[in-house]
Image (spheres, coloured by chain):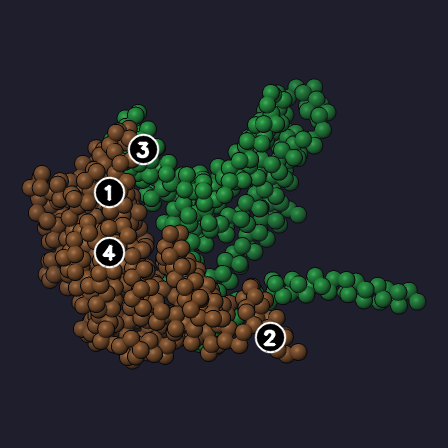
Chain colours: A green, B brown
Amino acid sequence: MSSILVKNEAKLGLKLVAPAVGIIGLLVIYPILFNIYLSFFDVQLNGDKTFVGLDNYTDLLGNPRYYHSVGVSIVYLIGTVIGTTVLGLAAAVLMNQEFRFRNLARGLILLPYFAPVISVVFGWQFIFDPVNGIYNHVVVDVLHLTDTRENLIGNPDSALFVVILFDIWKHFPIAYLLLLAKLQSVPKDLYEAAAIDGQNAWGRFWHVTLPELRFVIATVVLLRIIWNLNRFEDVYLLAPNVETLPIFTYYQAFAGIVDQGGAAAISVIQLLVLVGLIWLYVRKVLKW
Amino acid sequence: MKKSLLVASAVLVNGFLISPLSNAATVEFWTAQTQSDRLQTIELLASTFEALNDGVTVKVVGVDENEMATQMAAAVAAGTTPQLIEVNSEIIMALGEEGIVDTKTHQGVINDIGKQRFHKGALTTLTSPTGNYYGLPYHGWIQGIWYRKDWFDEKGLAAPNTWENIETAAKALTDKANNQYGILVGTKQDSYTEQVFTQLALSNNAAEFDAKGKLIFNSPATLETINYYKELAKYNPPGPQNWRARDYYLQGKMGMFFYSTYIMDDLALAEVAKGSLSSENFKELSGGTFDPELVKNTAFAPIISHKSAASYGTLSGLVALKTKSAADAKATKDFIEFMYDPASYITFLHMAPGGMNPMLKGIAEDSAYLDDPNGVFKLYGADKMKQIVSGFDDIRSFSVVKGKTFPASGAIFAKSVIPRMIYDVTIENEDPQQALDSAEAEMKTIMGK
């Protein structure tokens, strides 16, 4: 009798998850499989396909620009992830203190995150315009720090750092928001106990705040990695010559006439890289 | 039942209600004219056509020229291909090779209008290797160097019509400490860079293809052009630049710049706006000396000579795309012919007097054409206009060699191979020969597909 009950329950369970499985299958699994399939073809716009085997992959892996963009992406990822997390943490600790106009300050910090990308990108471009921008005006004409006007956003040596700076400025509020929420729930008596044990402010931060925040910080880092590995619009709009992986993919596959086979091959590799990275991070760093 | 299902799905697919008349047809028209005032003019033409043709809906969509190929690819893949687009000849040739262009409609329009009425060079530019028309020439521009005549005279410089003259003048007019720049050449990875490079390359007899269609881009002549380009880029405003930097010219911070005849409109507008833009309003900006006499002090050098004389221009055309609906195809053909009707044609061309020049003979002499609303043609004089339009009998470009067309050039253009090469050399300081080698390799990959 009990076995019938278990069987019936299993059937009901299957029925209940069926819609979710169906939707995920249709919207996630099918596109991934179709994408893998396409990566072995040369696809014309009118739908004609020619089987080319591994050509799309060998073209890609034989392209030096690809490895260059992997390098740029790694620098971009490390810079932005560390930058947003540290700045977000600092802002959260600061905003957790009592002071006048604290609520106002808490709200103002969020502004860069809310502002539309395109408008702040234009703002940054105007600021750094080599001929008319306020940055060069102040540095060259007012402070006389140097004679040469720099195009910081256009110059490939500095562009990557401007893009990293932009991302940190634009996205640290989300790290701040998540961390502040957790900070507010840290019990006060932990700090009191630490103070009785003779810990100064730094010791209290190191031994109480950080361990309490560990999982939130880990989540922030994970989210930032996923977002920024695929980040396109900020980089492309601000400095299209910074070739991170998504920008490389765009130039390679989507600029001009779309090379659907090639694009599929790139995204298959990118998916593998992302899955591998996340697996490594979750198992080795987070130890979940 | 089946019919109602069809209608319902048609409504779903199109996102709006189609009038249930039997001759109902839709022309979705993508235009590269994205400025709102130009879109308004095109909307007006579309409404006029709708009023004349019962049951036909014309939907005008503005698509940025640099995005056109990508957007088209997405639309074709999604099954929402527009019926008609207006875009530059390079992209037309690339799309033509993809097998989505309705060459029959084009042939029909040419038969109706008369082949001999089109400028010959313009029509050749859009002809496929097998003799089909991938598009219909609609308007075109000529590129050249626009320069401050008064500054040239002051310093005793010769007009920038040879390589030597250009370089000498660029050097003489650059004063970076005072925020003054000698010249603007494109160094960003976009089409402006290719346009500037092409004119210089043609004047040095460098080409992409020979008459047999063999790729001959990697040549001493091309290398020489790249080295020269790199020299000129030294006198550019700092960092990667594209056509937007022409604003520095309008602000009096640049001596000369490569630009199409489109600037005539902007210069004329600057003339109109001179009341509000005076040096006094901008005295805070270093170098900024706005010249109220800018039109008078600007001269145009359309031909650059080195090993040969090269004038460079390009044209935009109308392209009908394959559609399953015969009614839509018919309406598209009618709409194209309406757009060539002198009244609507001149209305369209007047959106950018001087920039958009007619591709049909006889229009430029039309008194209605010469009487544009901004008075641009009066400002420049009828003779100058006639001289510009006559250039279209012999437009030179990479894709046409001795009367034969090589559409692969369009695919290479669409992939920005040349602009990226120039960017690598001028901004990333890559070795010119190395950059040329990789550009050639990329061109071969594109042609192999």
Give whichever of B7, A119 is nearer the camera: B7
First in sequence, mark 1 or 2: give its number: 2
Q: Amino acid at mark 2?
A: Leu
* Residue found at the far right of this picture: A1
**The N terminus of chain B, quarter of image:** bottom right
Q: Are marks 4 and 3 in contact (CB under 8 Å)?
A: no
What's the amino acid at mark 1?
Glu
Mark closer to the observer (4, 3): 4
In the image, B325 versus B191, the foreground residue is B325
Name the image quarter holding the C terminus of chain B.
Answer: bottom left
- Mark 4 nearby-residue class (10 Å; few <14, some 14–19, many ≥20): some
Badges 1 and 2: C-beta atoms under 8 Å apart? no
Name the residue tied to disc 2: B6
Residues at marks 2 and 3, CA–CA distance in whole angstroms: 62 Å
* Pointer 1 chain: B
> What is the C-alpha distance between the residues marked 4 and 3?
44 Å
Q: Amino acid at mark 4?
A: Asp
Q: Answer left or right for B145 relative to B68.
A: left
- Which residue, given by chain and number where applicable, does mark 3 sit on? A136
Residue B371's disc number: 4
Answer left or right for A213 relative to A13.
left
For the point 36% across and 64% down, which residue is it? B86
